[in-house]
């Protein structure tokens, strides 16, 4: 069985950072109302933004892996 | 009065549309068990995306989530955080599950784990099957009860609770019975698109109607009740409780049987990964629904609600000056959330009931496939009926007791990870970890307050993983492959 390699180290760190940003202690630094961005209090904007950051990371990871693999399907 | 008639008519129209789409999905598909349960392992990007979306966004999205924002404030963001982080867990393990399922013909979660950790008479498979069904029925009951409540409130009682839940439950049971996963797929696509549009429209319209915009709304909350806009929120949810709730929900999300089993149904591993890339964006669906909850903080400041979960209904149906057709659409969107989840729950529970429980009992062994398929479809009706009756009886204490069963399902995660990635994973260690982890979770959930206010499931997971690792190292197992890899080489 040809085992596909696990995600790269860089990707795992990226995932770790996204996780920490959304829980204690990472989210502590965002715990305020000002500045409001796009009409949202900063703490709410923080979560909206990190969802997007993870999305971008997944796009990059997908493209990386798609470049390495051809044996799918 | 005429308004209520318009609302009722619109909603019945929506139900009819879902029923037609669901029944028509049956056309032209072969009637194999794999087709009925896993869409022949050939479900594509678009449909799988909306199935996974529908499974996560339940009645809770339209009732509970705005309720959290209204009652507590920003701690409601835990929902968005865990949904986003759950994708990381899926990304890391779902491709393996999909591949092994295809290779060994697995259709359920219990089959996978039971194959990795074989037991005499397949006791593990039977145990997981029973616990899973116990965990899913109350969840299904909540969807059906939610549908009934929505109907009654939005039609001003023209459609009473018992009839509303019966309609929703009946439509779901009919198309799941007839079309299996294909029916779920196409109806979830329809309902998912509806939900996205309706949620955003409602959120923005509510902020606009009461405040003249989202920014204005938050400015006003900042002046009148700023404690809602930062942690720990209005009711003081600590960072420990907040963070562990996020982590345990994100980790546990993969263990819900109805989600886990969908990994088998993907057309390919690449399809799965494409779904996951897009998936975080689905959590933006919740943002406008949280807006509605936040609006309630100011709008209902003088007359607070007893039950925060009613905040969306109260604002949209009673307080706002919305036209009847908009309320009808809002009701349809909320019903879509409840019913699309209910369909998946009924389908998965029925599969588990027959395949993991029935077929592991002496009377159920060696049944021909056609008979199993027939029984599974019958199971859909039985499970739906049971959940409907539970919703009518409304035994809240029973529901909360059964939710403890899900606490146990989450404790299967360490042994799953061990099976996939760890060659030293030992069977005895997995069982000890599972047993003690489940006991710790149940203890903190029902008897004692957990340390630091942490989520009971999180405490269980820590003890579970620690024991699993320690006992595995202590045992003399000298394998070169993880249990899942060993399956392949025999």
Image (cartoon, helix red, strand yellow):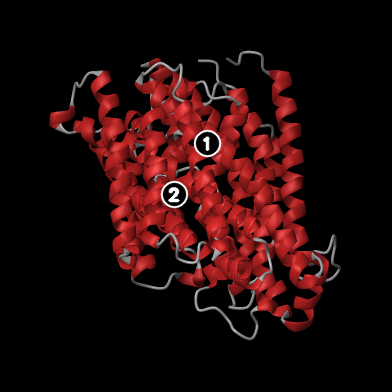
- Give the residue at the far front of this rendering: B2
Q: Position of residue B72 (x, y in %)?
A: 60, 73
Horizontally, residue B437 falls left or right of residue B321, namely left
Q: Would you place residue B479 above or below residue B301 in this image?
A: above
Q: Nearer the viewer, residue B472 or B244?
A: B244
Question: Neighbour class for label 2 at 10 Å: few (<14), some, many (≥20)?
Answer: many
Instruction: Please indicate, yes or no, whether residue A70 appears anywhere in the rendered image.
Output: yes
Instruction: Please indicate, yes or no, whether residue B355 appears anywhere in the rendered image.
Output: no
Q: Position of residue B320 (x, y in %)?
A: 67, 69
Q: Secondary structure at mark 2?
A: helix
Quarter of the image for the C terminus of chain B: give it: top left
Displayed quadrant of residue A56: top right
Which of the two marks, 2 or 1, is nearer to us in this view?
1
Horizontally, residue B258 falls left or right of residue A63, namely left
Which chain's residue wears label 2? B
First along the sequence among labels 2 and 1: 1
């Amino acid at each position: 069985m040809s085992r596909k390699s696990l995600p790269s180290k860089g990707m795992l760190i990226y995932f770790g950072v996204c996780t920490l940003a959304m829980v204690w202690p990472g989210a502590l630094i965002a715990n305020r109302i000002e500045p409001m961005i796009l009409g949202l209090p900063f703490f709410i904007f923080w979560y909206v933004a990190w969802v997007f950051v993870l999305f971008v990371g997944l796009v990059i990871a997908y493209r990386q892996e798609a470049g390495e693999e051809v044996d799918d399907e | 009065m005429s308004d209520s008639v318009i609302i009722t008519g619109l909603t019945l129209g929506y139900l009819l549309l879902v029923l037609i789409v669901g029944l028509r999905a049956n056309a032209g598909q072969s009637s194999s068990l794999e087709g009925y349960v896993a869409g022949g392992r050939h479900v594509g990007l678009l449909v799988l995306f909306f199935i996974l979306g529908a499974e996560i966004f339940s009645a809770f999205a339209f009732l509970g989530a705005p309720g959290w924002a209204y009652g507590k404030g920003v701690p409601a963001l835990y929902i968005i955080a865990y949904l986003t982080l759950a994708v990381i867990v899926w990304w890391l393990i779902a491709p393996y599950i999909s591949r092994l399922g295809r290779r060994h013909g697995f259709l359920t979660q219990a089959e996978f784990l039971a194959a990795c950790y074989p037991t005499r008479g397949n006791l593990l498979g039977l145990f997981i099957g029973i616990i899973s069904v116990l965990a899913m029925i109350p969840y299904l009951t909540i969807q059906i009860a939610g549908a009934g409540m929505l109907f009654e409130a939005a039609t001003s009682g023209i459609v009473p609770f018992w009839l509303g839940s019966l309609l929703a439950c009946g439509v779901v049971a009919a198309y799941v019975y007839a079309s299996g996963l294909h029916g779920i797929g196409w109806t979830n696509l329809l309902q998912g698109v509806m939900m996205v549009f309706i949620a955003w429209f409602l959120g923005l319209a509510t902020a606009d109607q009461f405040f003249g915009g989202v920014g204005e709304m938050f400015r006003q909350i900042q002046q009148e009740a700023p404690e809602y806009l930062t942690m720990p929120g209005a009711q003081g949810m600590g960072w420990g409780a907040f963070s562990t709730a996020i982590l345990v929900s994100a980790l546990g999300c993969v263990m819900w049987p109805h989600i886990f089993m969908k990994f088998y149904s993907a057309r390919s591993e690449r399809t799965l990964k494409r779904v996951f890339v897009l998936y975080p964006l689905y959590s933006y669906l919740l943002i406008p629904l949280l807006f509605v909850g936040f609006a309630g903080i100011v709008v209902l400041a003088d007359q607070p609600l007893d039950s925060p979960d009613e905040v969306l209904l109260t604002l949209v149906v009673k307080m706002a000056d919305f036209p009847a057709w908009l309320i009808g659409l809002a009701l349809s969107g909320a019903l879509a959330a409840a019913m699309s989840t209910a369909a998946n729950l009924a389908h998965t529970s029925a599969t588990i009931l027959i395949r993991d429980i029935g077929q592991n009992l002496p009377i159920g062994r060696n049944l021909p496939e056609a008979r199993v398929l027939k029984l599974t479809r019958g199971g859909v009706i039985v499970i739906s009926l049971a959940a409907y009756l539970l919703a009518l009886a409304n035994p809240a204490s029973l529901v909360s007791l059964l939710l403890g069963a899900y606490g146990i399902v989450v404790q299967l995660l360490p042994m799953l990870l061990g099976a996939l990635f760890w060659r030293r994973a030992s069977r005895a260690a997995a069982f000890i970890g599972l047993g003690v982890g489940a006991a710790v979770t149940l203890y903190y959930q029902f008897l004692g307050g957990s340390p630091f206010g942490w989520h009971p499931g999180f405490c269980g997971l820590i003890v579970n993983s620690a024991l699993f690792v320690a006992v595995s190292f202590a045992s003399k197992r000298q394998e070169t492959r993880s249990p899942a890899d060993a399956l392949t080489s025999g």
